[in-house]
Amino acid sequence: MSETVVSCTGVTRTYQEDTVPVYALRGVDFSVQQGEFVSLSGPSGSGKSTLLNVIGGLDRPDQGTVIVDGVDLSELSESELADMRLHKIGFVFQAYNLIPVLSALENVEFIMQLQGVGSVERRQKAQNILESLGIGELGNRRPGELSGGQQQRVAVARSIVTGPVLLLADEPSANLDSVTTRELLDLLRDLNEKRGMTIITATHDPMVMSYATRQVRLRDGAIEQDETPVTV
């Protein structure tokens, strides 16, 4: 049987907008097995990004439990959550979040530096991951010298270089054209199929949804539809 990587039970998240409560998540039950590629979709305000952030430990639910790789996130302190994100969860954001004064290689190295990996080992691992993603020759360039697609590949390299159990991608195609989007999705599919990486993405993009092996649609903070597309 597949291992459960993510388990959400009765997850509720409410925000205050002026004095009016806004229910971002309403008692969501949701689980993801090892090796799945899941897309979270739905209209703006449906809760998909909030659910992604709760799973990634970037936000805490008001009620319910979120278990990632066997760890109940509600039992962790802020520093323990940060450590969990550092070692277990990779993030790809629509804004890339690369450090502009560092080269591509140094951006990939940075997370390993935080982990305490030695300089020689992290330099070699960073170079290897850039080469495996087809941008090994761009290691010395800073983000401002790279195209959007190249920056997104560097962001992916940084997120997977430490071998996380889970990769979370928030609107990964938002700033990319259709050709670059397809290249990115081919890359994510390879990571999923060849490395068995578990991926969850929040997206509005039908192309991103089409690459997922499971499509989950949210509306008004609840799961409206959860299906596995039939492949021909």
Image: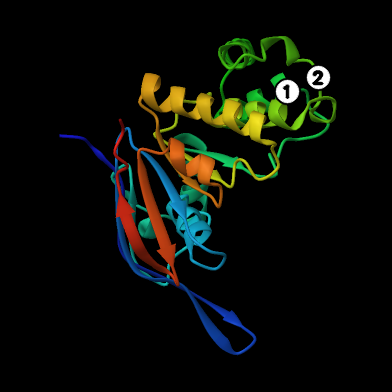
Query: Given the image, on which type of amino acid does mark 1 rest?
Result: Ala
Task: Name the image quarter holding the N terminus.
Answer: top left
Query: Given the image, on which type of amino acid does mark 2 rest?
Result: Arg
Pointer 1: what residue?
A: 104
The quarter of the displayed image where residue 159 is located = top right
User: SS class of the residue under badge 1?
Assistant: helix
**Residue 97 showing in the rendered view:** yes
Q: Residue at x 35, y 63 (%)?
A: 223
User: SS class of the residue under badge 2?
Assistant: loop
Q: CA distance from mark 1 to mark 2?
A: 6 Å
Q: Nearer the viewer, residue 142 or 146?
A: 146
Residues at circles 1 and 2 in contact by the CB criterion of under 8 Å:
yes
Furthest-front residue in this view: 232
Q: Residue at x 47, y 55 (%)?
A: 41
Viewed as shown, does residue 199 lie left or right of 153?
A: left
Q: State which tag comes first along the sequence, 1 or 2.
A: 1
In the image, residue 41 above or below residue 164 = below
Viewed as shown, does residue 62 lie left or right of 181?
A: left
Q: Nearer the viewer, residue 226 or 59?
A: 226
In the image, residue 157 above or below residue 221 = above
Q: Position of residue 110 (x, y in %)?
A: 66, 28
Viewed as shown, does residue 32 lie left or right of 121?
A: left
Q: Position of residue 105 (x, y in %)?
A: 70, 19
Furthest-left residue in this view: 1
Q: Residue at x 78, y 15 (%)?
A: 140
Q: Position of residue 203 (x, y in %)?
A: 53, 50
In the image, residue 159 above or below residue 168 = above
Pointer 2: what residue?
A: 141
**Residue 110 showing in the rendered view:** no
Q: Residue at x 60, y 10 (%)?
A: 124
Neighbours of disc 1 within 10 Å: few (<14), some (14-19), many (20+): many
